[in-house]
Each structure stands twice: as structure tokens, then as C-alpha cells.
Image (spheres, coloured by chain):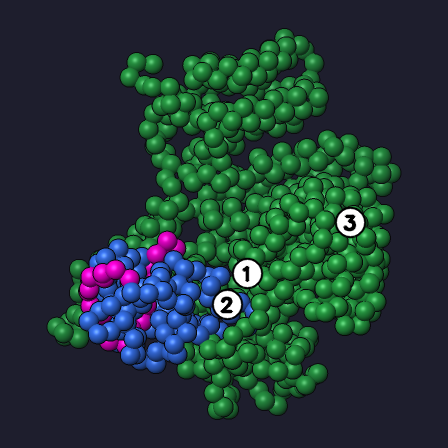
Amino acid sequence: MQAVLLPVHQELYALPVRWVREVLTAPQITPLPTAPPEFLGLFNLRGEIVPLFDTAALLGIGTIDAVAFTVVLLGPQGPAGLATTALPHRAVLDAPTGRSEHHGTAGTFRIGDRVAVLIEPSALLAPDRRLSAGSA
Amino acid sequence: MAGLDLAHVRALFAQEAAVRLARLGNQLLLLEQASGDRELVDSIFRELHTLKGSSAVAGFEDVSRIAHDLEELVDAVRGSEGAVTAEVIDRLLTGVDELNAAIVAGVGPLMPGPDAEPDVMPAQRVESPPSPDPVPPPRTESDGNGVVMVPMERLDELVRLVGESASAHLRVGRMLQERFRIDPASCAEYIKLSRSLNDLQDRTMRTRMVPVATMTDQMHRAARDVARARNKDIRWEVRGADTELDRGVLHRLSEAMLHLVRNAVDHGIECAAEREASGKPRQGLIRLHAMQLGSEVVIAISDDGAGIDTERVREQAARQGVDVEHMTEEDLCGLIFRSRLSTAALVTDISGRGVGLDVVRTTVEAASGRVEVRSERGVGTEFRIIVPITLAVLRCLLVDAGGQRFAIPFHRVITSRRYDAEAVTRAEGRPVVWVDQRPVRVSRLADTLAMSSEEACDGPVVVLGDTADSHAFQVDRLVGRRDVVLKGLGPPAPHLPVVAGAGVEPDGSILTVLDPPGLIRRAQRAARTDAPPAPAGRHSVRRHQVMVVDDALTVRELQRSILERAGYEVRVAGDGAQALSSLLQQPCDLVLTDVEMPNMDGFALTEAIRATPALANVPVLMLTSRAGDSDRQRGLDAGADGYILKSGFDEGSLLAAVNRLLGSTP
């Protein structure tokens, strides 16, 4: 499977390439007041307002304090950005090496000596899976 | 039919039928008020005759048969000398409904309909004088009169692209200045482009506009049907039907306007005998008056009926614990929009939905508008809906707070003023300022947005209001006014009650547009708990929990699914006893209960909740098929906070009622 690997701190996450629209350097982010922790804010993608998510917070592995790159994916509800801490790159995923536990992921894969966890964006970004600041 | 298959013919027929049925409905309502108009009768006959022929061609025999029966009826009217009776109009209007249903059953929802994407543009308005010529079946998107039906998404895309072009244009101006040392203001080509883009933006915005007339027939019909059902005699009058506003705004207001019209006929207009006894004409007047005032449109729905019984409102409000001692008549009228009062005391199912006026208020506020009421006992009542002409471009006040710039929709700004520390007093532990002789709480905007710094602030205050409350927010500074091309933030962005949307600034940055009602609710909730609002982000938030109690599995699961989709946590119980036992172990934020259940019914459950100190403040909403006044009163006496009839139950009314009682979305 063709995938884009997203470095998040010391870990690698893989996104099927069919989801990926483009990769950007760190965009200018406008934070939204009262937003939940996994939501970093909005950025302007050629006139289109796109939400940017903290990939680490979504996956429960801390937070990203400095966004290095943004992978723009085109989900069923519209475009969204996933923040990374280093340059994403393409890779071919072979057979899965095991299961993954976090919701929004779908198994682990071997990339050289490292492990990449496959992301399922529709589950990871589903509103009912994320914390809501609606009653904050 | 050579060259056209049946599916194509039927698609064409659907387009034709939509136009003809809208025209027929309009003509019948006009005929009721001008029953001697022979030309109108002839025109109705021709519409039916053509519809009969077209439907036969499209292979819809049942449609053709209904049209034929109606044609016979109208032919009989043509041959008689007398006036057209209300009974005949009843039969014809019902026939039009039957035709509509039969056509929808054959070809699906008709276009243009209230939810269909293409709009009837002004030149096609149904209130235009009836054309003596049959309308040829539209073969393209144009009806041959220079009118093209365009899906809304295309117009939205156009608005977005124009906004993007304007931003790019400003960036080019900055580049001219910085890189080439050319002042754009001295460059004739640049100025010409600026003008063209401004014109383009203006024209593009206009394409989204539709006249109020596109809604008036539906309201006329609603008024007429309620009047017939209640045996009342009314006259329907429309002024300013050509007033235009954004199609999206008008669409959002349609239910609220229909509710007010039905309400005016049902509760406003007295019966003919009563009117005569008080020296009024037998025929009551229902008037819709639309007008543009600046960047807002005012839609007034008035009646010359009995007016609001403010003494009754006072009694009901006092029973609900509202301090009514010093309230003026105007204040009392305003109370009818309060949720508990309107759901409890003034609930009505005349609209078939069992909702109160607070839902009207909620709907209007969702369209960034406000609703006001003026009433005089014995003279009549007027409801005024005031909305911005378009939600696509919003005039905003720009402010800085907590180191960030925000836009606040101007129609919510009551006033702004210098912050005078000496003029600030305190009440209930909170700072308060006087605005128009009323005390208004003050909060720092940055605090409310949970982005506070510890620095002291002496910036001005901006007083914001919605129809229920007002609140003053202290900001770092006022920046100015700006028309913002507003873009809503749907999923996957999170729903944030304090944020209405965002716009792209000329320099490409993003401007956050705040939602004043959401801000006010958040600030007041913080005031009530006497604690600063929950800090932004990086903390989990508990969702509201609703207990659904119903012995019918289908109803229970339907409610659960609606509430869970809306973001609530849901617990369920099969009867009152089970619910009470569960609540005693773990309370919830709201109980939604059926009335008729085994073991313990909804009344007994409500009484038990009220009698239990730990649960006494939990709001209870009853959902039942019992429509009788005595049942309703019994529920309210037991301590229920609201009452929804199953006959009028739908997702919107349920969520509106739940949101209302919980004071927020999940």
C-alpha cells in the first residue's frame, strides 16, 4: 500500500496516499478560543479555511508544540490538516506486522527498523471520537 | 416523444408541475379574496387543463385523473353566477395538495421546493400576474424568460472565489508597493481593477438574494387553513413582498414565520362575534410587512386581535419564580420568549409541532437575528423579526482581546464605551455597569474566551445583546468596522458555541468571528458558578447527560439516536421506577420522559424527582401523545419544565427543547 509517513516526535504514522491532498510547511495558524486540545486552529489554504489538528493529541501521545509540516488530507467532511514534527515522506507498506490499539488506527507496519502505525482518518477525525469543547 | 425517453419526459414534467402547482396555489388564495374574478377562474382552469394533459403524456394517470376532477369543479364554477365559496376553495386547495403528493410519489421531490436547491428567481415569482399562456415545459435550465435556476453551491463557490480574488488583489497592491515602489493608489489600472472587483462582489452577493414573496404564499395558506379550522374570518395582507434577503436566511426563518402566522390567527384574532361586540370589523387582519433598514431586513407579522394578556403572563412568570413586581407591559411581553414560560405556560400545538415562542427566538437567533414583540390589549400584536440581509457578508466590529483580533457581528452590538472604573459597581460578586438605566454585567472578553493574561486592562467595553440578555465585555481596544465574508466552520472543525465562523483577511490571515449569544451564555454561566470559565483546550470536558425514559423501544431508541448524534450522553430506562432507581445512584442533567408507562408513569416520576433533594433541580421534559389541557396542566403541576407532543415530535423540536432547558448545546 502506498502511504505517506508522518513523523510525530519519535514515532511514525502512516496515512494511505489516497487520502493525502498535499504537504505544506508550517502554515500560519489562527487558534480558536475555547477549542479542545487536539485542535490547533485554522489556516488559509489559497482562500480556503482549513482546520489543523495536533496529530499527537489525537493519538494520545502528548502534544505538538512546534508544527514542522502539515499534511492536508481530503476527508469525507472536507479538508483537514494533520501536524507533524518533521518532513513526511512516501513509503510502501507491506503486510501488517501486528494490531494497533488506539482508535483511529488500523495496524502496525515495518519500515526498516522502525514501526509505522496506520491511521484511519475517517475514524480519527470523527467528531464523536474527539473531545468536544461544546459545553466548556 | 421522439428522441425523449420516458424518464426524460417525466423529469421535464416534474419541472413544469412545480411551477404550475405553485401558481395554482397562489391563484386559489387570490380567488378566495376576489371570488368574482372570472379571469382568475379561467386561468386556474387552464393551469389544471394543461397539467392534466402533461401528466397523461408523462404516464401519470392518477395525476391526470385528479387534475380532471378539479378541472370539472372549476368548470362548474365558470358556469355559475355566484361567488366562489370557501368550501370550493377548500376542495381545490386539497386537490392541489393531492396533485403534489401524487407527482412527488411518481418523480420525487419537486423543484423548486423549500428544500430544493434551485430557486425561483424574482422574475418567476408566484405573485406575478398569472400568464394567460400555458408555460412551455422547460427544456433547459432556462425558462425562456432569461431566468436560470442555479444550485446554491455554485453561488457559494462564486462568492468564495470573488472573496479570494479580492484578497489576491490586495496582495498584489502590497507587492507593487514593497517590491516595485509603486503606489497602488496612483496606478490607474490597479484602481480600475479595484472598482471592478467591488462591483463583482456586490453583484455576486445579489445573486443569493430572493424576495420575501417566495415565502408569502406558504404563509397565506397556513393562515387561511388555521382560520378555516378555527372558524375565523381573516384578511391576509402583504406589504414589501419584493424586499430581498439572502436565500439561506429566508429559508432558516421559514418555520419561525409560519409559527408566528399560525399563532396570530389562532391566538391573536378573536372570533367574529367577539370582534363585533368590541366594535371591530368581523374580519380579522393578518399582515406581513417586510422592509429593508440599512443592512438589516425587518419582517413584521401583526394582527389586529386581542393582544397579549400580560396579566396571565405575569401570573405564569411569577409561578415560575420570575420577579415580575417592577416589570412594565413591554417587559412582560418580552417574557413570552423565555423557554420555561413558553414551554410551560404558552405551549401550543396549533402549528402541529407543539413548540413555544422560545423556539421562534432560537431559530431567529440561529440566523443571526433577533425577534421583538409589541402588543396592546384589545388592539393587536406585532412580532418583528430582524435579520441581516445576508449571512455571507457580515458587518463586524473588530476588537483586540488577549493579544488576538476578533470580529463581532455588528447587529449584536448595543453600544461601546470607554471603561470608567469609577462607574463600575458590583452586584452578586460581579462588576456591573449601567446601560440605558439597566444593570449589565461586565466580563473581560479575554477571560470569557479563556485566554486571559494577568495584566490589568483599561480598554473600552462593548455591550452585546441577544433577545434575552445583554452583557458587557471589556476588550483591549476597538479596531474598527469591517465587512467580513463569513465562512462557517463545519466538521471536521469542532463546534464551538462562542465562534460563529471565520473570514480571510486581505493579508491572507484568518479573522475569527465571535458568536455573541454564545459569548453571553458562556459569560453568564461563569458568573453563575462564580468561577472563571473552563480553561481553553488541553482539558477534557464532560458532556451533558440525558436520561430517556420510555417503555416503547422504538421511541426510546429514536430519541437516543437523535440525542447521541447531537453530542449528548444518553442513558435509558423502560419505566419511571427503573429511571428513578438509576437516577438515585447517578443523577443526570436532564430527564426526557414518556407519560404513560407501566410501574411508574411520567407524572409520578416527575413528582418523585422534585421530591428528592439531590434531583430536585434536574429539568424534566415530557414527551407524550396526550394532547389534553388537563394532562398538560397535570404534568406542569407535577414539576415538568416542558411538554412536547408526540404528534409534533421531530428531531429539531426535541433538540431545541433539550438545548433550551440545558442552556446550551452539548
* Chain part drawn in magenta: A75-96
Give the spatial CA distance, label 1 vs label 2. 8 Å
Q: Which of the two residues, B651 or B18, is positioned nearer the viewer here?
A: B651
Q: Which of the two residues, B559 or A77, is positioned nearer the viewer here?
A: B559
Report helix, strand or loop for mark 2.
loop
Instruction: Report the chain shown in blue.
Output: A
Marks 1 and 2: CB-CB under 8 Å?
yes
Residue under pointer 1? B567
Q: Chain B is drawn in which colour?
A: green
Task: Residue at 55% x, 84% y: name it.
Answer: B419
Q: Is residue B122 visible?
A: no
The circle on residue B209 is none
Q: Is residue B559 visible?
A: yes
Viewer-side label of 3, 1: 3
Q: What residue type is labelled 3?
A: Met
Residue B315 horizontal side relative to residue B359, left or right: right
Task: Give me the chain letter of mark 2.
Answer: A
Q: Is residue A92 magenta?
A: yes
Residue under pointer 2? A132
Task: Residue at 46% x, 72% y: name it.
Answer: A35
Residue under pointer 3? B597
User: Looking at the picture, do discs 1 and 2 lie on one chain?
Assistant: no
Find residue B269 and report its horizontal and vertical position in percent: 76, 41
Task: Residue at 37% x, 50% y: name it.
Answer: B156
Residue B182 occupies quadrant = bottom left
How packed mark 2 is, by other alpha carbons closer than 10 Å (few <14, some 14-19, many 20 or more), is: many
Find residue B498 and report its horizontal and vertical position in percent: 51, 69
